[in-house]
Image (spheres, coloured by chain):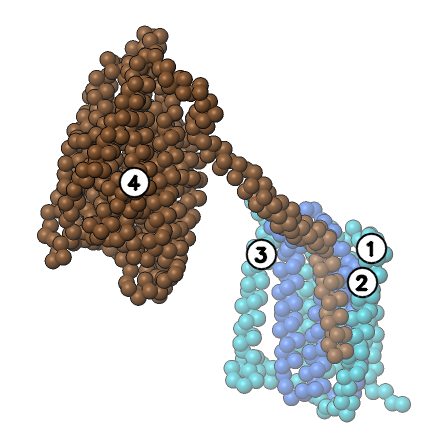
Chain colours: A blue, B cyan, C brown
Amino acid sequence: MEPEVHVIHYLIIGIVMMACGIYGFFTRKNLLALLISVELMLNAVNINFAVFCRYLFPDALEGHFFSLFGIAIAAAETAVAIAIIINVYRNIGHVQTDDITDLKG
Amino acid sequence: MNISLQEIAFYTVAACIIVCSVLAVTTGRILRAATYLLFVLLGTGALYGILGYTFLSAVQLMVYAGGIVVLYVFSILLTRSDRNMRYCIARGKLASVLVTTLAAAALMVFLTVTNGFALNMIPQGVELPVERIGTALTATGHGGFVLPFEVTGVLLLACMIGAIVIARKRE
Amino acid sequence: MDFTLFILACPAVGFLLLALAGMRMSHRAAGLTGTLLMAVTTVLSGATAWRFFTAARNADGVLPAQIPFNVEWLPLGGSLHIDMGMLLDPISVMMLVVVSGVSLMVHIYSLGYMKGERGFQRYYAFLSLFTFSMLGLVVAANVFQMYVFWELVGVSSYLLIGFYYTRPEAIAASKKAFIVTRFADLGFLIGILIYGYYVGTFSFSPSQEGLMRGGMMLPWALGLMFIGGAGKSAMFPLHIWLPDAMEGPTPVSALIHAATMVVAGVYQVARLFPLYIGYAPQVLHMVAVVGVVTAFYAATVACVQSDIKRVLAFSTISQIGFMMVALGVCTSVLPHEGGLGYMASMFHLFTHALFKALLFLGAGSIIHAVHSNEMSTMGGLRRYMPVTHITFLVACLAIAGIPGFSGFFSKDEILAACFAYSPVIGWIMTFIAGMTAFYMFRLYYGIFWGRENKALHEAHRPHESPLVMTAPLMILAVLTLAVGWMPFGHFISSDGEAYDIHIDATVASVSVIVALIAIALATWMYARPQQPVADALARRFPALHRAAYRRFYMDEAWLFVTRRIIFRCVSAPLAWWDRRVIDQFMNFMAWSANACAEELQPVQSGKVQSYTLWFLGGIVVLTLVLLAC
């Protein structure tokens, strides 16, 4: 199987996902929705890594592994973020960003 | 005009990803947003497959689509976030967000298009064998990735402990 | 280690002990601690003097100066460094004896005088501090160390003048003394800095090439140093603090403001005497002029004061003027050829310390008895206080210059030196000596004879002071009688060689006759209960009398200078500049920072989304900028 789709098409997908993530990150007020947006952005990045690796350096594995580790790190980040969100919820009863402005203790 | 199977698969998946991405950030129901995210992730896994990275695709499906989305759903239900999604955004803020986002997107498209990726550099790609991935992941020499592998392992451990400590109920 | 170190260590230990633990001691324990330590110091000083003056002389007949220790304390780069040391030479050893001796007398006397006073321990702590500083001053091995102790002496003087800190006059007097002397010390400091900068050392005896380098700047340095000395020694017109300093306890006046601290200026000039003679004789003659003016001015004022301590204060100023004149009229270091004044000055310093301390302690005894400083409350006290009366009379005779008493010998030497320099100054000083005799006997008659305030004495019968107070009086009286006969010139002379004192018959007889006339005049005017002559004179020249009583308006003149000229023309614009420009500029800085913060505060909303929006906008802009470049 050989790739026949032009590289720019892959990249456009990445850009669209990235833009959606950015938009969602700014407009959402629920922390979990915010996190969903972050996941979108991370995915866009991972796609870029894989695509670049595949198209520009087909013999190297760096991009592939970057994606792999990116997935692992995204998983870790999600776990911690969700733990924090649950803690926030436990403390103040909701997870709306408008009321979480202290950024401390 | 002959369209290969691969192209059909790619454009179908691409359309699915784009539509679901947009919906994931615009829908008013958070559970639906999580579901759209699931479709985006599945699509991304499919893209990896099309690229020939089948192992990566499997990991994507298992970790993201299988693990993380479930976490999301659980936490959405736990925090009762499925209400509270009705809110209005100030017009000025929305405008600034849209301008910034579109400017960033336009910039990225501009950079991508004008970069001039060699159109003729379409490699003879094949599926990446899992054996090679395994070897590289545990190799220490040139082209070996054992160090980032270990680091990621430690990171995951730290995150696990951290998540437990943070989410623990305080007396 | 040499035992001379303990001369300094004892009062220092006494001060620390009394200052830190004094309030837990009883009055008696604190007083005895201070007095015993002072007795040790006195004995050690005496031993030092004995050892020093009985040592073998050098080949050129000079007593060898000793430096028991000297440590480099503060290197200033180059060859300049400040040492802390101890220099024993004839004048410093003489001063050691005087300071520790008078201080011991005052310590003993204060046991009675200050009995039951609040802050008794504090008083003894300050006395120890003062004694330590003064001893440090006299043994200072270089001019900077002298300055350090000089200021310490000023501080302890300030503390002791303000001892009765609940009385506004005492506080005002202490501040006045501190500010005036501090102001004068500025001159001293500048002089020291010039001296150190140009001569390259702070030593009293710089090298020849250093002096060559100093050259033209040396007179300026010495003149400025003399301003400091003039301030401390209450020379006209910087004398204004000394009469007010009498607000302090009387024994303090005896110790600090009569016998020791106020002669520091004389001591300073004497210490730098070789430099003055060799390199700045014109400054030395200026010193003489200042001394003459001061002596005359203070003597006239002393003639009309009614507060007995004020009379003694002006008498002190006048006598210090005598010492300054004696130093100022020197024209060479050889005692036979114009250097007599040096020895005379030191001799007078020595005798004056004794009889003036005696006078002040006697005055303290009187004040103790009648609870007032005013002469009008006294009169006829000879019947109540025989010991005080006799000792006071001895001191009066000494200061008046009656043969046989110590003051006669030293004053005679001063007059001889003055005549040798200039007959005009000689006659002026003889006249002032007569005035001295006059006002001292006016004081004496006013206290012990004259108009008795019968009503007051009936109500509160004066009594003789206890033995602890009269004993120092008697000791000092005996010393006053004795020390005049000692061959002072053998110990101290301008070139260090032994010098026999000659009584110049002409000068001596003239001065004795003048003194006797003055005493007779005082007797005629003041000895009787009715004083028609004095009252008539006061009525005849009311303006003169009032002016003299108000000290010729010197305080007012200073107030005019400070308030009207300095405050208004210098301080007020400076204050305006400070308040309107400097402060306002600072306020503007603070205000602008505050305003900026107010403006920027909304940005710091704590909302992650707005932060990231700015972040993203920044990235876009930066990328565009980089692309455009």
Residue at the spot of label 2: B97
Real-space Cα separation, disc 1 to disc 4, in angstroms:
105 Å
Question: In the rendered structure, are the residues bearing label 2 and label 3 in contact, judged by CB atoms less than 8 Å apart?
Answer: no
Residue type (three-letter) at the residue carrying disc 4: Gly
Instruction: Identify whether C108 is placed above or below C212.
Output: above
Foreground: disc 3 or disc 1: 1
The residue indicated by pointer 1 is B89
Chain ID at mark 2: B
- Residue C420, horizontal then vertical, whole percent: 26, 45
Image quarter for residue C74? bottom left
In primary-sequence order, the first of circles 2 and 3 is: 2
Measured as percent of width and height from the top left, residue C252 is found at 31, 31
Does label 4 lie on the same chain as label 3? Answer: no
Q: What residue is rendered at 62% in x and 68% in y?
A: A73
Q: Which residue is mark 4?
A: C426
Q: Residue at x 83, y 79 (%)?
A: B11
- Mark 4 Cα within 10 Å, few/some/many (few <14, many 20+)? some
Residue C127: quadrant of the picture:
top left
